[in-house]
Structure formats: structure tokens, C-alpha cells
Amino acid sequence: MLSLLVVCALVASVLSNSEPQREVILFDKADGDNDGQLSRAELDNIFLAFDVNHDREVTNSEFENDWTVLYNLGAPLEARTLFIKADTNDDGHITDADLPQIFTFFDTNKDASISLDEFLTQWGELKNAPVDSIIVPVATTPSPEPPTSSHTH
């Protein structure tokens, strides 16, 4: 009886792990020519798919909403972490200016294409980034300048 339970547990484990990961599904959807590699344009399209208003600027709110609601890719914390890392110039948007650095991050062997292995490895690094690496910009007002004395001698 115990061995039957162990076998059932093993089968259940294999079946649950055989379901395609959402990262693999994302890679496959982005691989428009089905060559098993992502070109620069194909990777760019992953990020630009989050550009709801099509102004070629993905805001944090666009990204997080689409990540969690529209595409159901994961939790809001994952979305924020990925957005912050993808916003390579820290301007609060993912734009054309960020896309070359994003591609370089994923193309670890520098062959001008991204394999599924590269994509999954780098995706895992982004996803597993420590929470304390998330920096949320806080709007502040500048302090008033201290008065200067303008004494004439």
C-alpha cells in the first residue's frame, strides 16, 4: 500500500512538472519565425507588447497591470522587479533606449540571438532578484536654498 502511494505521488509530481512553464510559453510566442532563437526584434516585441497606448514607452503601471492581469505571468513583485531591471537608464519607462541593454543581458554567449536556455537562465536571474534590490523612486521636492548674505564691504 505504501509503495502504491509513493508511485502515485511520483506520477503526480511528474505530471505537475510536465506542464509548460510560462517562461517557455512566452519564449515560444515571441519566437515568430519558430527557429528556436530570439532575434533582437523578437525580444523587443516581448517588452513592447506591454505598451498599452502604443507610444513606444512602457510605464510601470502598464507593465505591472499587463503582467499580472492580461498575461497572468506572475505576481506584482515579479513585475516590479523585472520592470526596474529592464529600465536600464532609470527614466521610469522601458523604451527603445533600454532595449539594446536588455538584449545584451539575455544574449549571454554574444552570438546575436537568444536560445531558450539563455532566456530561461537570465529570466530566472531576474525573477530571483533579491527584494532589497528593488529601488522605488520617491518624488521629493528640493530643499530651499539657504539664504546667502550679500554684504558689500
Image: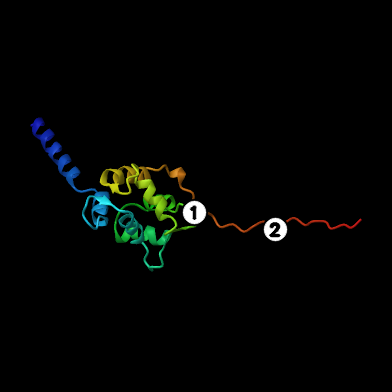
Which numbered mark, 2 or 1, is in the foreground of this view?
1
Circle 2 residue:
144
Residue at the front extreme, as displayed: 111
| Colouring convention used in this rendered image of the protein | rainbow
Res. 97 visible in picture: yes
Residue 102: give x, y in percent of width and height.
Answer: 39, 51
Circle 1 residue:
90
| Label 2 SS | loop
Inspect the image, locate mark 1, and give the three-letter code of the amino acid beneath it. Answer: Asp
Q: Residue at x 72, y 57 (%)?
A: 145
Residue at the right extreme, as displayed: 153
Front-lying residue, 71 or 30: 30
Quadrant housing residue 16? top left
**Quadrant location, the C terminus:** bottom right
Res. 80 visible in picture: no
Q: Judge whether 54 appears above or below 22 on screen.
A: below
| Label 1 SS | loop
Residue 47: give x, y in percent of width and height.
Answer: 35, 57
Quadrant housing residue 13? top left
Report the disc number at residue 140.
none
**Quadrant location, the N terminus:** top left
- Give yes or no for contact between labels 2 and 1 (Cβ–Cβ under 8 Å): no
Inspect the image, locate mark 2, and give the three-letter code of the amino acid beneath it. Answer: Pro
Front-lying residue, 20 or 14: 20
Q: Is residue 38 left or right of residue 76?
A: left
Q: Residue at x 30, y 46 (%)?
A: 119
Q: Residue at x 49, y 52 (%)?
A: 136
Sooner in the amino-acid sequence: mark 2 or mark 1: 1
Neighbourhood count class around disc 2 (C-alpha, 10 Å): few under 14, some 14–19, many 20 upward: few
Residue 148: give x, y in percent of width and height.
Answer: 79, 56
